[in-house]
Image: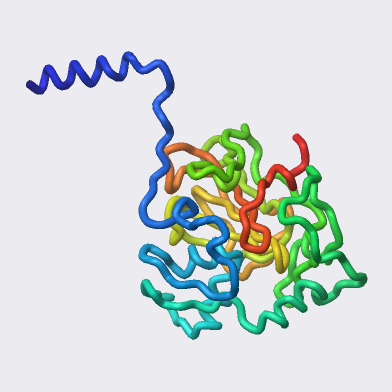
C-alpha cells in the first residue's frame, strides 16, 4: 500500500505543468482578515486573534500610543470584545497633522490617499534624512522629502487590493542582502508579533506615513531609534515564509497604498 501511495504522489508531482506555489506561513489574523475601512473612526472592538501590535499597524498607529491611551501595560494583553480608543483628543491630532512642529509654510491637507505621481516629494524637516545624535530632538515632517528602494533585487510581487492580493510589494534576493529604510523616520516596532510577517520592522515617517519591512533575518535597529533614508536596518531573510524576500508595505493614515507610487523608477 505504501509503495502504491508513493507512486501516485510521484506521478502527481511529475505531471505538474506549473511551479509549486510558494507558501506563506499563516496563523491567526493578518491583513487578509481586516476588512477594508474597518478602522473608520477613533475606536475599535477587539476581535479574536487580534494583538495590540496588529491593531496598531492596520490602523496606522504606534502601539505605545494605543497602550497609553487605554492604560494597557506590558505585555499588552487585550481580549475579544474590548473597546480600544485608537486616538486621543482628535482635535489635537488633527492640528498636529495640519500644523506639524517646525513647519514653515502651510500645505494642503486634502491630498488624495494614493497620489497619482510616481514619486512623492514634498516639504520635510531635512534632519529626518540625516544620522541622529541621541541628544537631538527630532520632529516628524509634514511630508516625506523622498523615498528610496528598501532593497536591491527583483520585484517579485506587486501591490493588490484583491482579497488574496499583497498589500505591499515583494522583492526577492539572497539571504543577508541589505534592507534599508525607505525614508527617514522613527522605528516604532521590531518583532514577530504580527502574523504572517516574520521578523518585522515598522518605521513612522510622519503623522500620516508608516512603512513596514517583513521576513527579515537579522534586525539592526531598535524601537524608538531614529533612522535616516538609506540606513541599513536589517538583512533579508525568510522568517514567516518559505522564500527569501522582503515584503515592503506603506500605509497612509492607516490605509494600504501602492509603494510603487512613491518609489523612484529603477
Query: Residue 262: horizontal and vertical position, in percent?
Result: 74, 47
The answer to whether residue 20 shows anywhere in this view is: yes
184 relative to 156 in the view: left or right: right
214 relative to 148 in the view: left or right: left
- The answer to whether residue 175 is above or below residue 32 is above
Residue lying furthest left in this view?
1
Query: Residue 159: horizontal and vertical position, in percent?
Result: 61, 42
Query: Residue at 79% of width from left, 67% of height from top?
Result: 141
Numbered marks: total: 0
Q: Quadrant of the N terminus?
A: top left
The residue lying toward the viewer, choosing from 24 and 163, is 163
111 relative to 221 in the view: left or right: right
Q: Quadrant of the C terminus?
A: top right
The answer to whether residue 189 shows anywhere in this view is: no
Query: Residue 5: horizontal and vertical position, in percent?
Result: 15, 21
Residue 50, by quadrant, is: bottom left
The image's colour scheme reads rainbow
The residue lying toward the viewer, choosing from 211 and 222, is 211
The residue lying toward the viewer, choosing from 76 and 86, is 86
23 relative to 111 in the view: left or right: left
Query: Residue 121: horizontal and vertical position, in percent?
Result: 83, 53
Query: Residue at 54% of width from left, 43% of height from top?
Result: 162
Query: Residue at 91% of width from left, 72% of height from top?
Result: 104
- The answer to whether residue 14 is above or below residue 24 is above
- The answer to whether residue 236 is above or below residue 183 is above
Query: Residue at 36% of width from left, 65% of height from top?
Result: 48
Amino acid at each position: 500500500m505504501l509503495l502504491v501511495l508513493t507512486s501516485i504522489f510521484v506521478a502527481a508531482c511529475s505531471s505538474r505543468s506549473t511551479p509549486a506555489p510558494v507558501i506563506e506561513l499563516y496563523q491567526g489574523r493578518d491583513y487578509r482578515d481586516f476588512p477594508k475601512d474597518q478602522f473608520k473612526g477613533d475606536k475599535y472592538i477587539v476581535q479574536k486573534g487580534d494583538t495590540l501590535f496588529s491593531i496598531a499597524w492596520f490602523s496606522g498607529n504606534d502601539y505605545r500610543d494605543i497602550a497609553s491611551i487605554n492604560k494597557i501595560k506590558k505585555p499588552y494583553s487585550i481580549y475579544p470584545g474590548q473597546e480600544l480608543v485608537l486616538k486621543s483628543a482628535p482635535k489635537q491630532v488633527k492640528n498636529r497633522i495640519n500644523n506639524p512642529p517646525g513647519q514653515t509654510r502651510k500645505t494642503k491637507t486634502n491630498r488624495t490617499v494614493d497620489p497619482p505621481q510616481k514619486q512623492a516629494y514634498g516639504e520635510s524637516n531635512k534632519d529626518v534624512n540625516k544620522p541622529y545624535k541621541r541628544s537631538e530632538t527630532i520632529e516628524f515632517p509634514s511630508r516625506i522629502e523622498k523615498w528610496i528602494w528598501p532593497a536591491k533585487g527583483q520585484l517579485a510581487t506587486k501591490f493588490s487590493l484583491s482579497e488574496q492580493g499583497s498589500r505591499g510589494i515583494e522583492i526577492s534576493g539572497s539571504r543577508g542582502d541589505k534592507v534599508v529604510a525607505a525614508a527617514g523616520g522613527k522605528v516604532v516596532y521590531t518583532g514577530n508579533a504580527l502574523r504572517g510577517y516574520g521578523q518585522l520592522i515598522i518605521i513612522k515617517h510622519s503623522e500620516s506615513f508608516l512603512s513596514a519591512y517583513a521576513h527579515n533575518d537579522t534586525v539592526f535597529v531598535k524601537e524608538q531609534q531614529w533612522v535616516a533614508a538609506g540606513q541599513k536596518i536589517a538583512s533579508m531573510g525568510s522568517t514567516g515564509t518559505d522564500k527569501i524576500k522582503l515584503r515592503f508595505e506603506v500605509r497612509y493614515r492607516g490605509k494600504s497604498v501602492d509603494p510603487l507610487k512613491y518609489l523612484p523608477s529603477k
